[in-house]
Structures are given as structure tokens and as C-alpha cells.
Image (cartoon, helix red, strand yellow):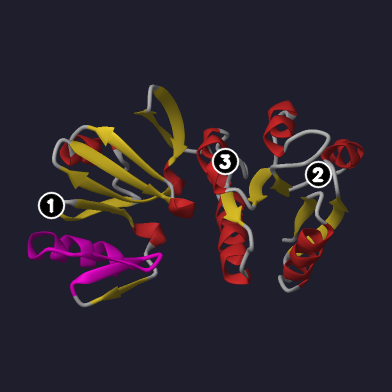
Amino acid sequence: MKLNIIIIDDEQLARKLLENYISKIEHLDLIGSFKSPIEALSLLKEKSIDIILLDIRMPDISGLDFLKTLENPSAIILTTAYREYALEGYEHNVTDYLLKPIEFSRFLKAINKVDINKNDTTTNYKKEIEYINLKYNKKTYRIALSSILYVKGENEYVNYYLKNDEKLLIYGTLKDIELKLPSSNFIRIHRSYIININEIDYVEGNRVVIQNQKLPISDSYKKIFLEKWNA
């Protein structure tokens, strides 16, 4: 089944790059490419759109402000050159957050996440986004679990390593966090580490590699981890 996709980005070169990427994926059907959210409004009312590639900084209205106006929005993949918007983007339960310049492999990974959601027939193609609330710097952020790469315990604190090099240092213990994170996606591999098993690039000896970060697997957790990894 083909997925209808549109691009909203005020930069022509960015639109051309995304159009090229879309043309390489057989099950994507590019319905429109727009330089502002205003231009896309009429099409969004007329057609069923599965994926919106949405830039954040645009002249008329920002991508995040536009997202707030949508009822029952499609899968949103944010695209931006500014990593400081990552945390705010996660608050809106977006499917993914792509940092420019976007590589094709990273783009494909984001699209594959939408495919998983679309094939979940138990929710009538509307997969509920799971999230966790984290207090950081006197603010409470709603963080999509899919945005968490791994979690590291650091004495009385827990450091959440998120996509696009974002980090959140939260007061608490790794044991408490282990109880909160769903075991379907997260597993402890070391007394100091819990990882998102869906984000593993590869396993090498007694280490897992997630976005070029090599994390140790201790002997006490190795058997359970390998059973889940090889299932």
C-alpha cells in the first residue's frame, strides 16, 4: 500500500532533496511540495495524507505552530537545521525529527517508523504514541519513548540520551526508570545502562553500538539481552 506524503519547507534546495529521496522509495507517493503551510491547507482538506515532512522555521508560520492547528494530524516528520527545537518537537509526539543536512539512510529510517504505525491493524492504523514526562530545568517535557536512544545512571541522576544529540539529566535512579520504561522496547544491559533495543545499530562482542556510541554489556545482563536481541 502506498503512503501519501507532502513536503512543507520554505527552502527550495531542501524540497528538491526530499523530493529526490521520496522518488527512491517505491511505496511513497508525493502528493505535493509547498514552501509554506498556508499553501498546503487546501490540499490537506481535500486529500488523505499519511506523512507530512514539516520544516520548523518558516516566514508565515512556524512548523510547530502550524502543527498545533491540525486536528488528527498525519504522521509528522520534522525537518530543521536547528537542533534546539528537538525537545519541543518531541512534546508534540512527532514520528521523527530529522536534522539538516539529512542523509538518505536517516530519512529512510524515519519513513520505516511510519510503516510500522500504518501496519498496526489493532489500532486501525492509528498507533498510540507512548511517552514519558520528564522534569528538566523547571519544565516538564513530554518525551516520546521512540526518541530515547539509551539511559545512563550517573550517581543520583539519570541521563537520557535522545536523538539529535539532545540530553536530559534528571534526578532519580536507574532502577526506578527501569520500572517505568516498557520492557517491549527497553532493556538493561549494564548496571549503568538501559537501551532502546529498536535503536541498536549492531552488537559487537560485549558491546552494543547506538549512533556510534559503544555501550558495554555486562555478564549479568548478557544472556537476557541476547535472548531478546535474537528473538
Is there a contact, CB below 8 Å, between mark 3 and mark 1? no
Q: Is residue 202 magenta?
A: no
Front position in the image: 187 or 170: 170
Please report the residue visible at 77 percent of the width from the left and 70 percent of the height from the top. Answer: 20
Earlier sequence position, callout 2 versus callout 3: 2
Compared with 42, 204 (above or below) is below
Q: Secondary structure at mark 1?
A: loop
Hey, what amino acid is under mark 3?
Tyr
Residue farthest top in this picture: 138
The stretch of residues the image draws in magenta is 206-231
Dots 2, 1 in contact, CB < 8 A: no
Q: Residues within 10 Å of mark 2 (few under 14, many from 20)?
A: few
Q: Nearer the viewer, residue 77 or 43?
A: 77
Q: Residues within 10 Å of mark 1 (few under 14, many from 20)?
A: some
Q: Quadrant of the N terminus?
A: bottom right
Give the residue at mark 3: 85
User: What kind of residue is marked 2?
Assistant: Ser
Q: Which residue is mark 2?
A: 48
